[in-house]
């Protein structure tokens, strides 16, 4: 297979009948023109009514977008369009937004984008990525009352009553509608007629799960999808956020954040050279897992200055006092148990956990000024799932004292119950992708190797599930090659959750994934390795290549030459047997 170049076709496929070819952005960016371009829902198989009176259209010219990890800096012009639609027989309103490139820059492409956490969109953060590559780009509010409103604000309807309409929209329906409407709308705006429109998707975290929700259900919705660090296996993933808290409670030790931070830093320092290159990046967390002894950190000093509270709505943190001390046996025990992953009280494995060198964000403790001690700080993201989605209570946190009785078995049971309740909506692990593969679709799946929110091994688990289900009667290497013709997984050295990593700043990040996917879909250039760029630190701007799973990176010649190697012991370290459950976990 040829390594992917980053060349992107400079113009749409020959033969596009483009009635807007000689138009300008101001010509197409009027309310009346947009209203005329709205698709007929019946022709795209939707029982909805598009509200033409709700249309807004605003032209934006020569605005610069910088600092995004998912696409390069650029100056763009676009038409910002919004309108609403409602479902037949339902008194609802779904808001969608599409950015349209100037006609001269349109290259016959459409892009859907996803959200994160319980948000079904990333507002306008991801939309520039479409404009840069000559695509119209869309987001949806899922019918949740606006782009800033999350799914969990609509679920449940009331205590004990699930909101199934909202659940289905978040699970998969809203993105299907966004794409069907967006594709035909794009063709109408640019007068494409029957010409080919290439359709794509890009999302990470919950956005990664949303991408898979469509690939698993709708074979021809997209020509290609980028699914980063997907929050699939939803019940397991959400409950997993509580595992670190239960470890601390069970072991009776609540480590200062600085202690766990130093354990992570010492792990990075020790495991950095295991990939053959000393650059502050752990590219082989598997070798780290196999060879590094956490006990070697015992007695090492840590010191952190006091920090003020953060009011960041996405990650609020309390003020923390100055912290000084030495790494304790108790702190090491907490770290080791977290890395090992959830097991029930009989020792059977229930779930996987984060790789060594990832930070211990779920284990963050809070300081009690009255007792001068560190205390449990229950993960808000983790606690919301059993309260809101299993107990169906219109609340986001446990009642006082409830968590006192939570054990490893409780977590396992919550995972199993949530799995059963949301198998057909949120789990998103259907492994037979034959229809998508037969339709010619391509998937570029990536995951930060030091992800501190969604375990990297979760993506490996799904990739291997697809491989074993779709290619059961051929060898591992043969099935990996067959799967790689249309679905490839890349583990990003040093990367955190859908982002670069301040603890490993010299790690590369795949900023040009959409260019790679377009080249794969439209030009047939399969990415043998994935292009990535160091976006911060002393080597900022340097490009590196990322190996496709199951090959692993190894550097030689004093860290100047990288090879993608097959290492059976390392591969085995990523594979788990979830024997705590009577059913297969895909």
Image: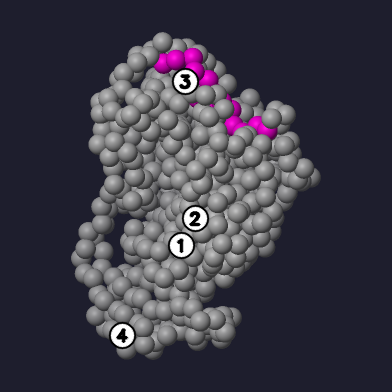
Label 2 element class: loop
**C-beta proximity under 8 Å, tags 1 and 4:** no
Of labels 4 and 3, earlier in sequence is: 4
Q: Which residue is mark 3?
A: 331
In the displayed structure, 379 sits above or below 126; it is above
Label 4 element class: helix
Report the span colored magenta: 327-344
Label 1 element class: helix
Q: What mark, if any, has residue 395 been given in the picture?
A: 2
Q: Callout 2: 10 Å neighbours few (<14), some, many (20+)?
A: many
Residue 453 location in percent, x, y? Answer: 47, 41
Q: CA distance from mark 4 to mark 2?
A: 41 Å
Label 3 element class: helix
**C-beta proximity under 8 Å, tags 4 and 2:** no
**C-beta proximity under 8 Å, tags 4 and 3:** no
Q: How many marks?
A: 4
Which residue is at a point 25% across and 52% down the rendered structure image?
Answer: 66
Which residue is at a point 24% across and 80% down the rendered structure image?
Answer: 26
Tell me where residue 64 sits by quadrant: bottom left
Mark 4 or 2: the one toward you: 2
Q: Which residue is mark 1?
A: 153
- Asked if residue 41 shows in the view, the reply is yes
Q: What mark, if any, has residue 31 been given in the picture?
A: 4
Residue 25 location in percent, x, y? Answer: 26, 77
Mark 1 or 4: the one toward you: 1
């Amino acid at each position: 297979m040829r390594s992917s170049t980053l060349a992107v076709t400079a113009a749409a496929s020959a033969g596009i009948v483009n009635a807007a070819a000689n138009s300008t952005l101001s010509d197409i960016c009027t309310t009346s023109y947009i209203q005329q371009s709205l698709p007929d829902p019946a022709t795209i198989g939707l029982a909805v009514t598009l509200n033409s009176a709700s249309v807004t259209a605003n032209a934006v010219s020569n605005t610069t977008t910088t600092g995004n990890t998912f696409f390069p800096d650029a100056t763009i012009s676009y038409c910002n369009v919004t309108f609403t639609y409602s479902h037949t027989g339902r008194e609802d309103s779904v808001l969608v937004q599409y950015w349209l490139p100037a006609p001269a820059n349109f290259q016959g492409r459409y892009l859907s984008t996803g959200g994160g956490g319980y948000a079904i969109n990333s507002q306008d953060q991801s939309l520039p990525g479409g404009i840069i590559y000559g695509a119209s780009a869309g987001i949806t509010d899922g019918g949740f009352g606006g782009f800033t409103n999350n799914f969990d604000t609509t679920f449940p309807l009331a205590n004990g009553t699930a909101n199934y309409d909202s659940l289905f929209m978040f699970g998969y329906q809203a993105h299907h509608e966004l794409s069907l409407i967006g594709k035909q709308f794009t063709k109408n705006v640019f007068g494409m007629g029957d010409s080919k429109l290439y359709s794509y998707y890009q999302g990470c975290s919950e956005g990664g799960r949303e991408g898979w929700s469509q690939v698993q259900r709708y074979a021809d919705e997209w020509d290609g999808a980028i699914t980063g660090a997907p929050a699939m296996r939803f019940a397991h993933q959400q409950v997993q956020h509580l595992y670190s808290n239960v470890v601390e409670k069970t072991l009776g030790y609540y480590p200062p954040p600085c202690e766990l931070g130093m354990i992570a830093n010492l792990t990075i320092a020790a495991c950095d050279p295991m990939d053959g290159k000393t650059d502050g990046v752990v590219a082989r967390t598997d070798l780290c897992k196999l060879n590094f002894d956490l006990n070697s950190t015992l007695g090492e000093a840590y010191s952190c200055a006091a920090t003020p509270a953060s009011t960041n709505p996405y990650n609020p943190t309390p003020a923390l006092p100055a912290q000084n001390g030495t790494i304790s046996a108790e702190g090491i025990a907490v770290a080791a148990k977290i890395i090992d992953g959830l097991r029930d009280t009989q020792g059977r494995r229930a779930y996987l956990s984060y790789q060594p060198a990832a930070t211990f964000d779920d284990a963050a403790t809070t300081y009690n000024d009255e007792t001068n001690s560190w205390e449990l700080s229950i993960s808000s993201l983790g606690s919301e799932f059993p309260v809101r989605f299993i107990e169906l209570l219109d609340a986001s946190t446990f009642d006082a004292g409830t968590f006192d009785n939570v054990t490893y078995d409780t977590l396992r049971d919550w995972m199993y119950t949530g799995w059963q309740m949301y198998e057909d909506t949120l789990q998103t692990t259907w492994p037979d992708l034959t229809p998508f593969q037969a339709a010619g679709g391509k998937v570029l799946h990536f995951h930060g190797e030091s992800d501190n929110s969604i375990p990297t091994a979760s993506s490996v688990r799904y990739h291997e599930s697809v491989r074993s289900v779709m290619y059961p009667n051929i060898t591992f290497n043969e099935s990996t090659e067959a799967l790689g013709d249309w679905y490839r997984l890349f583990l990003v050295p040093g990367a955190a959750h859908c982002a670069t990593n301040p603890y490993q700043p010299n790690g590369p990040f795949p900023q040009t994934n959409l260019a790679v996917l377009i080249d794969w879909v439209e030009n047939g250039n399969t990415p043998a390795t994935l292009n990535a760029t160091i976006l911060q630190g002393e080597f900022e701007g340097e490009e590196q290549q990322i190996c496709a799973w199951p090959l692993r990176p190894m550097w030689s010649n004093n860290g100047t030459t990288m090879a993608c190697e097959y290492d059976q012991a390392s591969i085995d370290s990523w594979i788990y047997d979830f024997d705590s459950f009577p059913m297969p976990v895909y």
